[in-house]
Amino acid sequence: MNSARDSRIAIVGAGPGGLTCARVLQQHGRSVAVFEREASADARPQGGTLDLHADTGQAALRAAGLLEQFQALSRPEGEEWRVLDFANAALLMHQGPSAAGGRPEIDRGQLRGLLLGSLAEGTVRWDRAVTGVTPLPDGTCRLLFGDGTAEDFDLVVGADGAWSRVRPALSQAAPAYTGVTFVETGFDHCDTRHPDLARLVGNGSMLAKGVGRSLVAQRNSNGHIRAYIALRTPEDWHVAAGIDLGEQRAVRTHLLRMFDGWDESLRYLLSNNDSGFVNRPLYVLPAPHTWEHVPGVTLLGDAAHLMPPVGLGANLAMLHGSDLAHALVTGSSIHDAVRAYESIMLPRSNEAAAGSAQGLDRLVPAAAF
C-alpha cells in the first residue's frame, strides 16, 4: 500500500468540493490532478449565489488559506431574507444580515474562480470526460476516459456531481426526483432596468410561497437577480401541458396561469424576465446513503450526498474536500486516510440530507401552512 505522501491522486470534477480538496493537498506539497469534462473554466455559467457558513464552507476556505480573499469577494448584506405574502406582497418576515456576518453570499462563478486561481498551473485537465472507474486488485483504481484512454491512480475521488460516473464503483444508488422543479430565470441591471423588483428583493433573497408553488429571487453580483419558480409537479409537467420548453412565450403563459391570484409585483418575475426559462428538476440520493469501503476510490459533494439546494450541499462538499485532503496529508496510508474520512463524512452528510429535505418542504409546502 502506497503511503499517502507519495500517492497518485485524481479528483474527478472541478466543482467547489473537488477544487478545495486539490488546493489543500497542494498547500501541503502533494501532487494531484483534477479531471473536468467541461472544455474550459468559462464553458458555461456556474449558477447563482451561495451562502458560505462559518463552520463548513468558510472553515474549508480557512484550511485552504483563502478565507481573506473570499471575504473580499463576498457580500455580507446578501444574508438578508424577505418573506412576502403571495396575495398582496406584504412583508411577513424580514431578517437582516447577522452582526457577525456568519453566512455571507458569493456568486458560484466567483467562488470557482477563487479556487481555480489558487491551484498550480495545469492542475485541472479540461475537456477530459470520465466514463467510469475500475478498482484494481492491488488497491489502486483505473480511471476510464471518453476518448478510450485510461490512467491508474492510488486514489480516485469522485467529485463529479449528481450523475457521478465514479459512484457506481461504490454504490448502486441513483438520484430520484423530489417532486419539486425549479424553473430558473434572471434579470439584468436590476437597479436601473427593474427598480421595483430590486426594492422587492432587497440586498439578499426574497420568498413568497403558496401551496405547491413558490417564488424565490436572489440578488447576485453586478446588479443581477436570479429567480426560481418552484413547483410541486410531476417531472414531465411540460409534456403533460403540451409545452415545448424552448418556446419561452408558451412557458411564460403557462406559468402565469399557475400563479393566477398572486400579486402583480410578484408575477413580474414571470412576465418581465431578461433571460429565458430553464427547467431544473431537483433530485436527491436516498438518505442515508452509505457504502462499504472500497480501496482506491471515494466520493465527496453531490456524488456522495446529493440533496436539495436549500441546505448545506456546497458547504459540505467544500468541508469534506478539506477533510479528505487533511486525512491524506496526515494519514500513514491512503487506505487508513480514506476510512477515517468516510467515518466522519457519511454520518454528517446523512444528517444534513434530512435537514435539507425538511427545508425543501418549508420552501414549497405541499399543503396549507
Image (cartoon, helix red, strand yellow):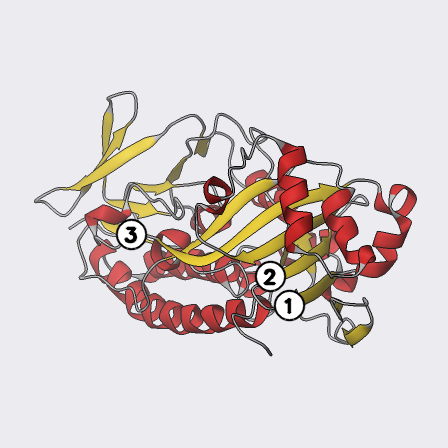
Query: Are the residues tagged 2 and 3 within 8 Å (C-beta)?
Result: no
Q: Nearer the viewer, mark 3 or mark 1?
A: 1
Q: CA distance from mark 2 to mark 1?
A: 5 Å
Badge 3 or badge 1: first in the primary sequence = 3
In the rendered structure, the answer to whether residue 247 lies left or right of residue 88 reads left
- Residue 10 falls in image quadrant: top left
Q: Nearer the viewer, residue 164 or 345?
A: 164
Give percent across and percent down for residue 133: 22, 39
Q: Residue 174 — which label? A: 3
Give the number of the mark in front: 2 or 3: 2
Q: Position of residue 61 (x, y in %)?
A: 57, 58
The residue at 63%/45% (across/down) is: 254
Residue 249's x, y, as percent? 67, 34
Compare residues 323 and 208 and report the one nearer the observer: 208
| Label 3 SS | loop
Give the labeled residue for mark 1.
210
Residue denoted by label 2: 213
In this rendered view, identify the residue nearer to me: 303 or 198: 198
- Compared across the picture, whether 23 is left or right of 112 comes to left
Q: Amino acid at mark 1?
A: Gly
From mark 2 to mark 3, how far is it between C-alphas?
Answer: 26 Å
